[in-house]
Image (cartoon, rainbow, N blue to C red):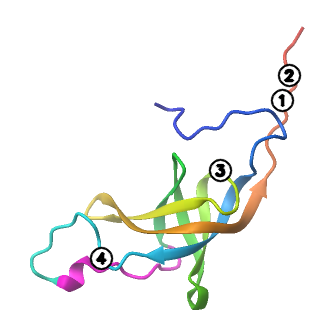
Amino acid sequence: DRLVGMVLGHPGKLPSIYIEIEVKFYLLRRLLGVKTDGDAKQNKVKKLGKGEFLMVNIGSTAAGGRVLGIKAENDMAKIALSNPVCTTEGDKVALSRMIDKHWRLIGWGTISKGTTIKPLESEGPKK
């Protein structure tokens, strides 16, 4: 179970490893699967806020992410990931927010660019 979301491959053949991503995002109008007491305002999805902590799902990988900045005119968000993620530009992401002690889907997006790091080089098998 702990290997879910991990990527294995030959050196130089894997996608880049991102620690920060810029996402073109789309927010849902209302929360899914949340019962409210007749108050329609309560289940509306609020806009993303700077400094907010989100759960970012990329493929089968779930990573925490802090919103560093938002460009409202073109719905772009810059997100610092809590752990590095091996992915490519153009991949789809799901955005979730903690609501009433549960992660709730609030939107989705596409990775447009980001900050990458280099993987560690191994020495190979010893003889």
Q: Tell me where residue 75 sits by quadrant.
A: bottom right
In this rendering, the label closer to the viewer, 1 or 4: 4
Q: Is residue 109 left or right of residue 36?
A: right
Q: Which mark is residue 124?
A: 2
Residues under numbered marks 2 and 3 in contact, where contact means CB atoms less than 8 Å apart: no
Question: Which secondary structure is most common in the magenta stretch?
Answer: loop
For marks 1 and 4, the one nearer the N-term is 4
* Amino acid type assigned to the residue bearing label 4 in the image: Arg
- The residue that appears at 51% across and 45% down in the rendered structure is 60
Residue at the bottom extreme of this rendering:
73
Instruction: Report crowding for label 2: few under 14, some 14 to 19, many 20 or more residues within 10 A (C-alpha).
Output: few
Mark 4 or 2, nearer chain start:
4
Q: Quadrant of the C terminus?
A: top right
Q: Which residue is mark 4?
A: 30
- The answer to the question of whether label 1 and label 2 lie on touching residues, with beta carbons closer than 8 A, is yes
Rounded to the nearest whole Å, what is the CA distance between mark 1 and mark 3? 18 Å
The magenta stretch is 40-51
Secondary structure, mark 4, is: loop
Query: Mark 3 highlights which residue?
Result: 84
The amino acid on which the numbered mark 3 sits, given as a three-letter code, is: Pro
Q: What kind of residue is marked 1?
A: Ser
Q: Position of residue 115 (x, y in %)?
A: 74, 63
Residue at screen point 65% across, 50% down: 84
Q: Amino acid at mark 2?
A: Gly
Q: Nearer the viewer, residue 63 or 88?
A: 88
